[in-house]
Amino acid sequence: MTEIAQAHAPSYYTATAHPREPAPALAGSASADVCIVGGGYTGLHAALTLAEAGRKVVLLEENLIGWGASGRNGGQLHTGQRRDQSYLEDTFGKEMARRLWDLSQEAKALVKGRIDRHRIDCDWMPGLIHAVHKERYLSEELAYAEKLSRDYGYDAIDKLDRDALAKAIGTDVYFGGTRDREAGHLHPLNLALGLARAAEAAGVTIHEATRATRLVEENGRVVVETTNGRVDAGDVLLAGNGYLAGLDTDLDARVMPINNYILTTEPLDEARADALIPGREAAADSRFVVHYWRLTKDRRMLFGGGETYSPSFPADIASFVRKHLLGIYPQLADVKIDHAWGGTLAVTQNRLPYLRRVRKNVYAAAGFSGHGVAIAGFSGHIAALAMIGDSERFDIMSSLPVARFPGGRLLRWPILVLAMSWFALRDRL
């Protein structure tokens, strides 16, 4: 039976995406050097790297390119790993922390470089502000900026006191923060679609509306069975992040899907937009359950806030997110909400990504914990490099410990709900 692709989420990104002809579903059997399961950043960057190295690549996507988190996220490109350098030094030592920093810088450069090289029109804008929501956190935030400059030679961060931050983001509810001039924001779905065009131009075969159902080893190769046929491959990359339940039990045990939500307002006039974020940077705050926001190219406020930990989305996503928005920008109470949507990302217990050779000739990359614009694509890229003989970067990332969630698949949901509810309460208090 042929799978039917679900449409993209009814988001601002879908409404402003650059149209792309859908790829045909797989029909029958195919053969490849590498089969990639998942058409988001991880799979697309991997496919492009492999095709540029001369490998024959088949990429399978259950729905449409960028349908998952890659086409729904906040669009923020961060510096560093998901955990900061102080945590990495304390946990793994300074030498390993330095390697992870260097890899994160490569990840950021990979995204920017491919945007430039393939002329991907995705509204790239530099600048990312981190706003501190508790006064006692501010000294730590400023000291961390000094640490990155002193120990890592990273001088792209400006310190912002309370008044400077209020002028930069149009609200006085925060106590200060920092601005990273080399981080920034973009249109995530158009980035994914642009990467798909580049991959196809390099020779990658993409099949949308094709759901992978099982992996089978045959004669030293891996067969990916799907709803529409099968692909016989030398190597396989599982690149579906929060949408891979059932394809690998170890991945399922260590990576947890959660849901996050975003809205966009109607377009604001220029004066009102300038009163909010005159420099057009993106912003995120220091809460454990992060609020993040920015102005789009057409001057809409795009705001993300709130998570849920069940498979279903709230009945009224706009109202669910709007209450978080008005806690920061009460002056937007009169503004109409034009789009509101949710999406599924994947987290790990320690928020470090899960990269592994899960079995012979099968690689997996998932669990980017809200840091996927840079790290997800880079993870696919280094998995691809490992397949063609350069495994140094992949080996470093795959050495990071990622524990199983307690309770297995049956109990991990309620345990996560309890933990995340506690952190949300701590944010409010």
Image: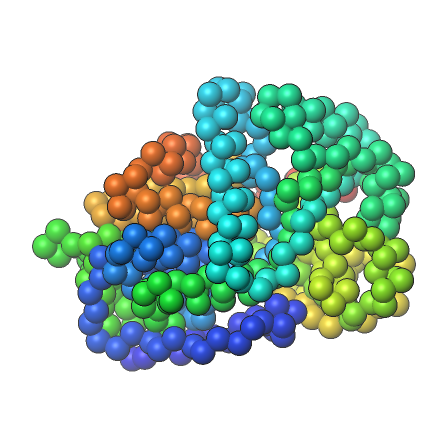
Q: Quadrant of residue 5?
A: bottom left
Colour convention of the picture: rainbow
Numbered label tally: 0
Is residue 287 shown left or right of residue 6?
right
Q: Quadrant of residue 57?
A: bottom left
Is residue 187 shown left or right of residue 231?
right
In this rendering, is residue 90 above or below 26? above
- Residue 407 seen in the figure: no
Q: In x, y percent, where is residue 134?
A: 79, 34
Is residue 335 shown left or right of residue 152?
right
Q: Quadrant of residue 12?
A: bottom right
Q: In x, y percent, where is residue 409?
A: 41, 49
For the N terminus, the quadrant is bottom left
Q: In x, y percent, where is residue 24?
A: 35, 77
Q: Residue at x 72, y 30 (%)?
A: 141
Q: Residue at x 30, y 39 (%)?
A: 390
Q: Residue at x 89, y 38 (%)?
A: 163
In this rendering, is residue 204 above or below 135? below
Q: Nearer the viewer, residue 243 or 379?
A: 379
Q: Residue furthest left?
A: 219
Q: Nearer the viewer, residue 269 or 81?
A: 269
Q: Residue at x 71, y 64 (%)?
A: 297
For the C terminus, the quadrant is top right
- Residue 258 seen in the figure: yes
